[in-house]
Amino acid sequence: MARNATNKLLQKAKESKSDEFYTQLSDIESELQYYKDHFKGKVVFCNCDDPGTSNFFKYFASNFKELGLKKLISACYRRQERNLFNTKEYESGFFYEYSGAKVEKTKPSLNEVVHFKGDGDFRSAESIELLKRSDIVVTNPPFSLFREYVEQLIRYDKKFLVIGNINAITYKEIFKLIKGNKAWLGINLGRGISGFIVPEHYELYGTEARIDNLGNRVVSPNNCLWLTNLDTPKRHEDMTLAKSYFGNEIEYPRYDNYDGINVNKTKDIPSDYSGVMGVPITFLHKYNPEQFEIIKFRKGNDEKDLSINGKCPYFRILIKNKRIQESEKKNRRGEREIERYLKNPIEITVRGNAYDFEGPLLSL
Ligand SMILES: C[S@@+](CC[C@H](N)C(=O)[O-])C[C@H]1O[C@@H](n2cnc3c(N)ncnc32)[C@H](O)[C@@H]1O
C-alpha cells in the first residue's frame, strides 16, 4: 500500500516534469506531413503554446499558405519558463491570432499579442471561447492533464492531433475513445518522436540526452505517441499476418479467465484464428478498424487482469479478426445456398443473374 502510494507520487512527479517538454520542429514536420489535406480553410488552435517559442506555432505560421489555413491561434499559459514576453510585470496568459497577412511570419511582436484576463488555462472560459472558434487543435499539452485535455476536445467536438504519453492508451477514458473509433494513434510512436527540448533546470538523462546544434537541451523518453481523430490512409491498411495458429497452438496459450488466446507480439498475430486474441497495446499503432475489432482491455470475464496459469502477462487488448469473421459468414452463406439448391435443384441466383449449375450438381 505504502509502496503503491510512493509509486503514484513518483508517477505524478514524472508527469508534471514532462509538462515542460517542448516539441521539436523536426518531430512536428515528420508527423504533420501525413495530414496536409485536412487543413484547407481551417482555423488551427495551439492552446498550450507560447507563439514566441512554440514550434507548433512556427510550423503552422511557416506553412500557412501551403496548408491553405484560414487562421492560426496560439495561446500561452502564464509563467512559461521559455516565454519571451514574461518579464514578471504581468502573469496573465496571452494569445496571438495570425491570418497569414505577412509572408513567412514565424513570431509575433510584443504589441501583437492579446492578454487574457486570467492565466490562459486551456479550461478557462477565455480559452474555450477561442476553442469554439477553431476547427483543429494541434499541440503537445501538459501530460499531467491529458485526460481532461482530450475530454474537452471531444466535448467541443473538435478535430485534433496531440502528443501524449504511450501510457495514455491505458487510461480508461482514452481507451474508450479508441475502442469507439473516436480517436486513434497517429503515425509516429516511441522512437518515432525523436526527443523534447527541456528547460535549463531540467536534468539531462539517458544515453540519448543531448544538446542540439541550436543549443537546445534535448531528452528522448521514447515513450510518446500522437493521438488524433484526423484520418490517414495508413489507418485503413491491413496488417500483414504471416503466422498461423493452427499447427502452432503451443505458442498461443489460452487465458484462465477469458475465452481467448494470448499473443505476445503484434507481428505474431495469427491469420487463421477467428476467436478473441489478447495483443500488446502497441498493436494500436497498426490497428485498422476494418481488419480488427477491439473487444475489451486488460480484464477477463471476472474483471480481474487477464491471466495464464495464474500469471498476468503485460496489459493486453482483446481483439477479433473481422476479415475471418466476414469470410466465415460468406462461407456459411454459401453453404446455405448450396443446401437450398440441393433441396430444390432448378436454378440458383448468383449476383442477381440466374444460372443453371453444370456438371455433377445437375445430375443430382
Ligand atoms: C508539454 S509542454 C508543451 C509546450 C508546447 N505545446 C510544445 O509542444 O512545445 C506543455 C505546455 O502546457 C502549458 N500548460 C500547463 N498547464 C496548462 C494549462 N492548464 N493550460 C494551458 N497550458 C498549460 C505548459 O506551460 C507547457 O508550456
Image: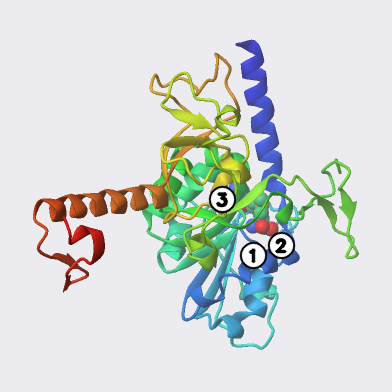
Q: Is the CB of mark 2 within 8 Å of ligand 1? A: no
**Badge 3 is on which residue?**
241
User: Between 184 and 338, which is closer to the camera in this rendering?
Assistant: 338
- Pointers 3 and 2 in contact (C-beta within 8 Å): no
- Pointers 2 and 1 in contact (C-beta within 8 Å): yes
**Badge 1 is on which residue?**
31
Q: Which mark is residue 27?
A: 2
Residue 185 is situated, as x and y percent measured from the top left of the image, at: 55, 53
Residue 348 is situated, as x and y percent measured from the top left of the image, at: 15, 64
Instruction: Work out whether 242 lies above or below 278.
Output: below
Identity of the residue drawn at 64% across and 79% down: 63
User: Between 140 and 193, which is closer to the camera in this rendering?
Assistant: 193
The three-letter code of the residue at mark 1 reads Glu
Residue 88 seen from this side? no
- Between label 1 and label 3, give the one nearer the viewer: 3
The three-letter code of the residue at mark 2 reads Asp
Residue 120 is situated, as x and y percent measured from the top left of the image, at: 55, 55
User: Residue 357 sits in which quadrant?
Assistant: bottom left
Identity of the residue drawn at 64% across and 77% down: 61
